[in-house]
Amino acid sequence: MENAEDAERARAPAARGREVRGFVLHDGLLDPAEQAALVEDLRGVIAGARLFSPMTPHGKPMSVRMTSAGAVGWVSDRRGYRYAPLHPRGTPWPPIPERVLAVWRAVAGVGRLPDCCLINFYAEGARMGMHQDRDEADFAWPVVSISLGDEALFRIGNVARGGSTESLWLRSGDVMVMGGAARLAHHGVDRIAFGSSTLLPRAGRINLTLRVAL
């Protein structure tokens, strides 16, 4: 008989996408109305947990601003990269909006829900260097990424640093699943095409990453 953990890991039906170096991309999964509804939900999250500018452990400021929703949020400062139960201002993170969880249910293919939704905002000139998502307790769970707003040039590398890479443009409404052998692959955002979308009144890109962190 399966135990509770096995039951949580049971794969649920998931939408089909195309594979890019082990990542599964669902092109245009969210239509314009769904994108706009998500943005409104995120406005409520940000009202309760303001965007902040994180700093790397080496003291270098990141070019993105971020916040989180869920049981824990991802933070970075001189003490390192980690998940924390409170916003840097000392307040709890808001719950993950149901519309965001619905995307996870549609594509993740697992029974367990995420306990963190990291929200990154890319203004003009913002980027994200090549990195791995490895602050989670168990890498068996996928990471689901939702793109909203301006297009982003997304680069996919390898589990080991270095080697060949592949780049593709992520557009508003695209959803990417990083799991299996590609779960720890290096990836990053080289640049955004500022003003390429009309979803956000002042342009820019919002990226949501849903994670099982604990």
Image (spheres, rainbow, N blue to C red):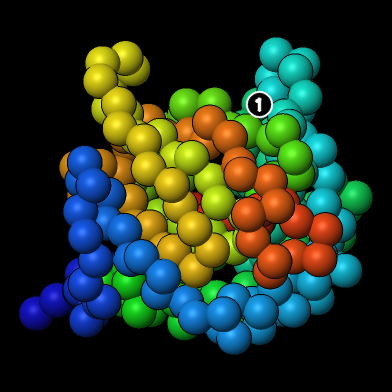
Q: Is residue 105 above or below residue 70?
A: below
Depth check: 83 or 166 in front?
166
Q: Residue at x 27, y 56 (%)?
A: 24
Q: Residue 57: x, y in percent?
A: 69, 20
- Quarter of the image with the N terminus is bottom left
Label 1 SS: strand
Depth check: 188 or 209 in front?
188
Q: Residue at x 81, y 38 (%)?
A: 53
Depth check: 173 or 24 in front?
173
Q: Residue 43: x, y in percent?
A: 80, 72
Q: Residue furthest left?
A: 1
Q: Quadrant of residue 12?
A: bottom left
Residue of label 1: 80
Q: Residue 83: x, y in percent?
A: 62, 45
Q: Quadrant of residue 68?
A: bottom right
Q: Residue 85: x, y in percent?
A: 70, 55
Q: Is residue 147 visible?
A: yes
